[in-house]
Amino acid sequence: MEEQLIRAAFHARQHAYTPYSHFRVGAALLSADGTIIEGCNIENATYGATNCAERTAFFKAVSEGIREFRMIAIVGGVEQGSDRVSDFAYPCGICRQVMREFCDPKSFKVIVAKSVEDYEVYALEDLLPNSFGPSNLLM
């Protein structure tokens, strides 16, 4: 499943809108029912209105009623290659917090990849230790 998600993330990366940084990112989010939702980063001249690939995928899924997820694959870089990048593109802090909103930090997996053969897999809790989430607000 990891390789399939990585391929989907590379596919999503092709749609990135990055006229300023030229740093194209693609993400592929796997829902609990096996649906794959792709997302790319979308830049804006103000930079503050830019949206990351990971959040694009999550927001697309949530807007369609999907709220349970198993893993996400992320690929990114300035290279124009369609199946390889030179480094891992880890999710930013805001994206990690969005993942925490919808995912169990112990079981949700985050894949960062350079290619379908070269990737790392993390539990969300490893990337966002001691996180604050919905369960912290329960009375």
Image (cartoon, helix red, strand yellow):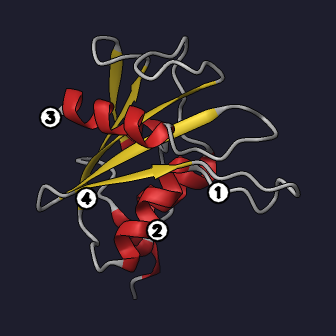
At a point 77% along the width and 41% down the height, the residue shown is 19
Viewer can see residue 41: yes
At a point 47% along the width and 43% down the height, the residue shown is 129
C-alpha distance separating marks 2 and 4 = 12 Å
Q: Check disc 4: other Cα within 10 Å, few if <14, some if 14-19, many if 20+.
A: many
Q: Is mark 1 on a helix, strand or loop?
A: loop
- In the rendered image, which residue does mark 3 sit on? 1
- In the rendered image, which residue does mark 4 sit on? 69
At a point 40% along the width and 88% down the height, the residue shown is 139
- In the rendered image, which residue does mark 2 sit on? 59
Q: What element carries label 2?
A: helix
Residue type, label 2: Phe
- In the rendered image, which residue does mark 1 sit on? 51
Q: Are marks 3 and 4 in contact (CB under 8 Å)?
A: no
Residue type, label 1: Asn
C-alpha distance separating marks 3 and 1 = 26 Å
Q: What element carries label 4?
A: strand
Residue type, label 3: Met
Q: Where is residue 133 in the image (x, y as percent from the top left)?
A: 46, 67
Q: Are marks 3 and 2 in contact (CB under 8 Å)?
A: no
